[in-house]
Image: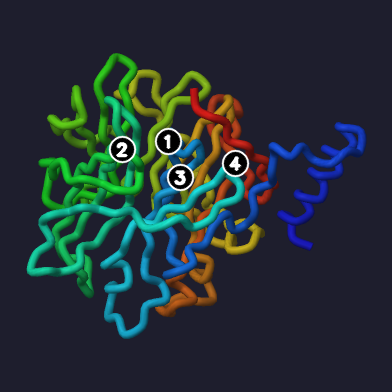
Amino acid sequence: MTKYLASIIGFCLGLALLVGCQSMPSESAIAPKPLYRDPSYDGAADPLVIWNRNEKKWFMFYTNRRANATNVQGVEWVHGTPIGIAESEDGANWQYRTDAMINYPFSQDKQVPTYWAPDVLYAEGQYHMFLTIVPGIFQDWRHPRSIVHFTSTDLLNWDYAQSLKLNSERVIDADVIALPQGGYRLFYNDEPDGKSVYYADSNDLFAWQDKGKLDIQSRGEGPTAFEWQGYWWLVVDAWKGLSVYRSKDLNTWEMQSRRLLEQPGTGLDDGVIGGHPDVIVNEGKAYLFYFTHPGRTADNQGIDDYSTRRSSIQLTELKFSDGWLTTDRDQATLIQLQVPH
């Protein structure tokens, strides 16, 4: 019996005793492992979760890597990727909905563009997506990437707004937050500078001023920032687990000594490091969504095929302990996301 399964049984027994041996409340659910797999390419990665105000449900956007594609060379399977959308009523049970309709007008020579790592937020009366775009399908990584801004009223259809001018022509993985004093901040990864985290500020989400490199100690991809327990947090995919930083003012950052999700879990598809996260703070709790490549184990080093390319979305709850973040990915996660305030 795995540790994860044992934790589910123990959790349910404890809850049954607590409520007098009645069934678990219908409004709560234990998140499965994996939380979600894409039904078309089986390459769900880079999750972003947001409340759909129109439909009154949760949407999860994700990069849909073409893990099961055949007759591809090099890293072509990571290019030509659509942005998938899954939906959920509670945050635990997810179903594929559709691919996002990205109305991008600048495809070069009729090439299929590559879409990576969407960040989506609601602000100024509409939805905004900040999306990494590569202009085509390529066998290697040596090509431009830009962060492009789109807007939407329904989270399904996206209209081009602008391509951002940032520190270089090889930038990826946007994450945008509303600043407490007003305005917005965009964190992103600048690849030419050793894949360092940079940031830019804006008053209105349209005019951006690049502020340069963030003063943190490690490199990484997929930065995600959120406010919880009296701190601003920044979680970064360091390719060996998730580096964690905290700040009181979004300017001075302290690094946590231990990375999250560095040690493999025991749940299904969770026996490897976790990558490129999103965090949802809801009703005082913080939930960490991340993805794994289940086949990328020590025994499979050097293998590049469907078994090592496929990816799954996972979920775990964050805990606040002694001023820092912890999580037990093997502990069953009970979740019932509520309508955001």
Can residue 244 be seen in the rendering of this structure?
A: no
Q: Earlier in the sequence, mark 4 or mark 2?
A: 4
- The circle drawn on residue 153 is 2
Q: Please provide percent x and percent y for residue 328.
A: 64, 45
Could you give the CA–CA distance between mark 1 and mark 2, rounded to whole angstroms?
9 Å
- Give the CA distance from mark 4 to mark 3: 11 Å
Q: Is residue 157 left or right of residue 238?
A: left
**Sequence order check, earlier mark of 2 and 3:** 3
Residue type at tag 1: Asn
Instruction: Report the disc number at residue 90.
Output: 4
Three-letter amino acid code of the residue under disc 3 = Phe
Q: What is the CA distance from the residue labelled 3 to the residue labelled 1? A: 11 Å
Please determine whether, in this image, residue 304 is positioned above or below residue 59: below
Quote the CA–CA distance across marks 4 and 2. Answer: 22 Å
Q: Amino acid at mark 4?
A: Asp
Q: Quadrant of residue 319?
A: top right
- Looking at the image, residue 339 sits to the left or right of residue 225; the answer is right
* Marks 1 and 2, the one that precedes in the sequence: 1
Give the residue type that dot 2 points to. Thr
- Which sits earlier in the primary sequence, circle 1 or circle 4? 1
Of the numbered discs 4 and 3, the one sitting upstream in the chain is 3
Q: Nearer the viewer, residue 255 or 318?
A: 318
Foreground tag (2 vs 3): 2
Residue 54: assigned label: 1
- Judged by depth in the image, the label closer to the viewer, 3 or 1, is 1
Q: Which residue is mark 3?
A: 59
Q: Say whether residue 127 is visible.
A: yes
